[in-house]
Amino acid sequence: MSTPQNPTGPTGRPSVAEELRAQTGPYFGDFGGRFLPEALVPALDELTEVYEKALVDPEFVAELQRLAAEYTGRPSLLSEAPRFSELAGGARILLKREDLNHTGSHKINNVLGQALLTRRMGKTRVIAETGAGQHGVATATAAALFGLDCTIYMGEEDTQRQALNVARMRLLGAEVVPVTHGSRTLKDAINEAFRDWVTNVATTHYLLGTVAGPHPFPVMVRNFHRIIGEEARSQVLERAGRLPDAAVACVGGGSNAMGLFHAFLDDPEVRLLGCEAGGDGVATGRHSATIGGGRPGVLHGARSMVMQDEDGQTIESHSVSAGLDYPSVGPEHAWLADIGRAEYRAVDDDAAMEAFALLSMTEGIMPALESAHALAGALELGRELGPDAVIVVCLSGRGDKDVHTASSWFGLLGDEEPGRGDLQALRARAREALAATEARTVAARPTTPEEMA
Amino acid sequence: MSSPTAAPHDPRGAAAPLRAGDVLERTRAEGRPALIGYLPVGFPDLEGSIAAAATLIDHGVDMIELGLPFSDPVMDGPVIQEAATRALAGGTRTRDVLRAVSELSGRGAAIVVMSYWNPILAYGVDAFARDLAAAGGAGLITPDLTPDEAGEWIAASEAHGLDRVFLVAPSSPRDRLEYVVGHTRGFVYAASTMGVTGTRTSVSAATEGLVERTREAGARNVCVGLGVSTGEQAAEVGAYADGVIVGSAFVRALLEAEPGDLAPLAAVADDLRAGIDRARPGARP
């Protein structure tokens, strides 16, 4: 898959052996593995075999590339964000626009890959879990495209906060099952999907939507998403003439982050920052910052970091963003944190909602609430790194689905509720950023001494 | 080996706890399959769950499978999920399960614990094995742990002399059956169907084939679980299996009964035991 001892080539890749990028599971350090009922072992073995064959089958690769180009709309853009950058202390922020993919998020990359595998295995039905609805919509879309039956499990609480996506899935022909057990969010949707899978595994593929779960899911899902980082890496090299100082992405299960990070794993000069959902603040206990606030354990088929009590019972996670509301994380992230290759920070609901509004008002791009966590992380990191820094942020999804949540947050529902966020103050900050950017553009070019030198 | 709390119930005083294999050899000698009953600890509360398990023993159940309630029971259907959720809401802890084992051991039935893997990891694998053995437990059933990931548990169960019950399923090919059987001690848990726990109107005809294949792979004791709820089904499955495992039917009897009323549970046990006793009409005695 990768070429060890590759000399520095035209891409500027360092000449070290590509050890970190070469990890293919089932274990990532102490993490990963397969902790599932024996009944599912044959299905996981079959999936591993079919996947590994497909990966080196030119026909499969060509089909996936054709779909990426003609259906998803790849490569996705790398957009400058000069006014938003002003808010990050002037650091140059480049947005990897996965929000422009068909269905509105990065999720489609993985879904198309697994849908092709489903067909190769001769299975006729896919099931999936979804939190925010992005993965459910992507799966329902692929099921329509390939003529597969489709059932989506979604926590009842999430069906309420993401009602628009529930309607989208049903309109695409999928059955949406609200899950009423436990915390009624993403983790319970995954439990229910596993129960369905073990019952119907002969005809059904579990189209898992993140880099978690038993082997081969973490490595397979990462590989279907690594195109994000591969494109971003060459786009930044072309645009900035060098590698970025940092790559930033949000982390729930962590699929868009692994997709972005993977291409940079063996570029030690590129800092990797994963932004977990801090909810009401890690100190309150009401959060989803698994790496920051959990400890090693086994949940949903893999050993990873898990939010759990003293007895190993899962603690319910909390986040304003349904897609990050998950008490575990992909095992490769747990490993990258463990060896210090990537850093993980918690971004609380307030900071994420601010970044959501600020990107909307400065750049005219409304991000998904999940992606807004990465944007908030980039604002903080930019101020730390200074104006010479180049930071790539994965804008993993678009924010249409979150308009209701944001309206409620900022008191725009017209129901007399005051709202938690102050939109006027954010608008003032956005105006300042706009003015500063304009002043710089008008004044700068010919006379700036740095530019002359 | 018996803990002090278990001693009053143990007619033989400090005798070694019954292992699963002991029970299955005894029932084999009696010419019948064993009846194995599952109940989650802490439902309706700790004392209530211990009383319920004692009732099962008094009504002909040969082996008790005590469930450690878990927040994310992916192998369980709605009935056991409901009981586990209530047990956890009531504050049930891992140490309560060990206490229940201790209270129930020495009553003539083998006591095994069934647990998802994370609570055992959190307790400490060796520490749990040590404390389970000290409480008089026979061993552990691990529905989401296959031998592939069980290195630490295999070492701990060897060190503390405990049974290791792994599962096989209708989907298991020959090489997996051999692998699982090779790492199992006590009995192999054969899932009668592809699916989760719960009562079913019929037990799949393929189950007998799975039991046969598991024996061909080297297993001496193969017990069948998932879906058995009536004496009729127990008789049918018990004709070929070494043990018949019943869970949801008992839990449902508790869920539907008035608090503290164990008569409906006893009635279910009696019906199942009658089925067990007529499972092999030609056999002795």
Image (cartoon, coloured by chain):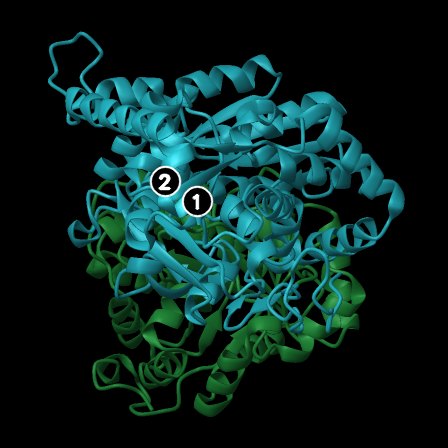
Chain colours: A cyan, B green
Q: Position of residue A16 (x, y in %)?
A: 64, 73
Q: How dense is the environment of label 1, judged by Cα within 10 Å: few (below 14), some, or many (20 and up)?
A: few
How many numbered badges does the structure rendering display? 2
- Cα separation, mark 1 vs mark 2, equals 6 Å
Q: How dense is the environment of label 2, judged by Cα within 10 Å: few (below 14), some, or many (20 and up)?
A: few
Relative horizontal placement of residue A142, taking residue A191 as reference (left or right): right
Q: Position of residue A15 (x, y in %)?
A: 67, 71
- Please tell me which residue is depicted at 57% across the width and 35% down the height of the picture: A107
Tag 1 secondary structure: helix
Q: Is residue A236 visible?
A: yes
The foreground one among A416 and B122 is A416
The amino acid type found where label 1 is placed reads Met
For the residues labelled 1 and 2, say whether their Cβ atoms are less than 8 Å apart.
Answer: yes
The foreground one among A235 and B270 is A235
Q: What label sits on residue A144 in the rendered view?
A: none
- Please tell me which residue is depicted at 52% across the width and 24% down the height of the picture: A176
B20 vs B86: above or below: below
Toward the top, the furthest residue is A414
Q: Which residue is mark 1?
A: A452
Chain label for disc 1: A
Chain label for disc 2: A
The foreground one among A423 and B219 is A423
Q: Which residue is mark 2?
A: A448
